[in-house]
Image: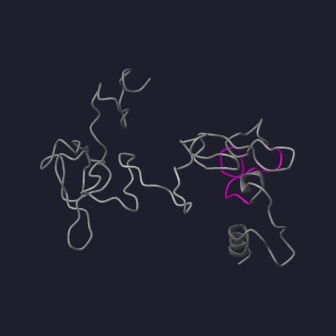
Amino acid sequence: MRRYFLILCLTLGACTDGSTPAPTGDIRAHQGAPASPGCGNGFCETGEDHASCAADCCDQQADGNCAAQCGNGFCENAENHASCANDCCETADTGACVAVCGNGFCEAGEDHDSCASDCCETSASGACVSACGNGFCEAGEDHGTCAVDCCETTASGHCVPVCGNGFCEVDEICPADCP
């Protein structure tokens, strides 16, 4: 029960039972209760800091907040689309992200007609319609029915490795693909 309360507290940004202080700044700077201790588990624990475990701990500023780090997948503090397009979307006057055709995401305002590279063609039920040759191995397609989109698979379900295709596949030994 306490774990669920803590998650709720962290989500809302404040705790009211007095047993757990409300976090300040970026939550990555605070310690948690990970399933398994050690660097790389997603929690900044006692004995870890940014220098010893950058994977779990942010680089803290004097005010205790994490320093913004462009390229980490989070639009933080003073970052915006102009300063860090990798983390922050371009926003409209409303503050909502502006849809960008060609970014690999079918966003609000896009559909197959306006942005086929991001959005699939849909059936009456709203499900994507399989389309051989669109670069995606979709439901109903396999290597036999659409070799352009679907790889030949092994008994374990992994793609049969192909040296020189630019992908390091499971069990592949290929210096060109797996440096």
In the picture, the quarter occupied by the C terminus is top left
Q: Nearer the viewer, residue 161 or 29?
A: 29
Counting from the top left corner in percent of width and height, residue 52 is at: 77, 36
Q: Position of residue 99 (x, y in %)?
A: 42, 54
Front residue of 78 and 93: 93
Q: Residue furthest top?
A: 175
Q: Name the residue located 21 percent from the left edge and 45 percent from the top edge.
A: 149
- On screen, residue 124 versus residue 111, left or right, reads left
| Residue at x-position 13% and y-position 47% | 144
Task: Please name the residue shown 86% across and 73% down the image.
Answer: 19
> Is-magenta flag for residue 155?
no
Q: Residue furthest front?
A: 93
Point out residue 143 in the picture as x, y percentages from the top left corner.
17, 46
Left or right relative to 91: residue 172: left
Vertical position of residue 82 compared to residue 10: above or below: above
The magenta-colored residue range is 33-48
Location of residue 4 by image quarter = bottom right
Q: Quadrant of residue 69?
A: top right
Q: Position of residue 50 (x, y in %)?
A: 76, 40
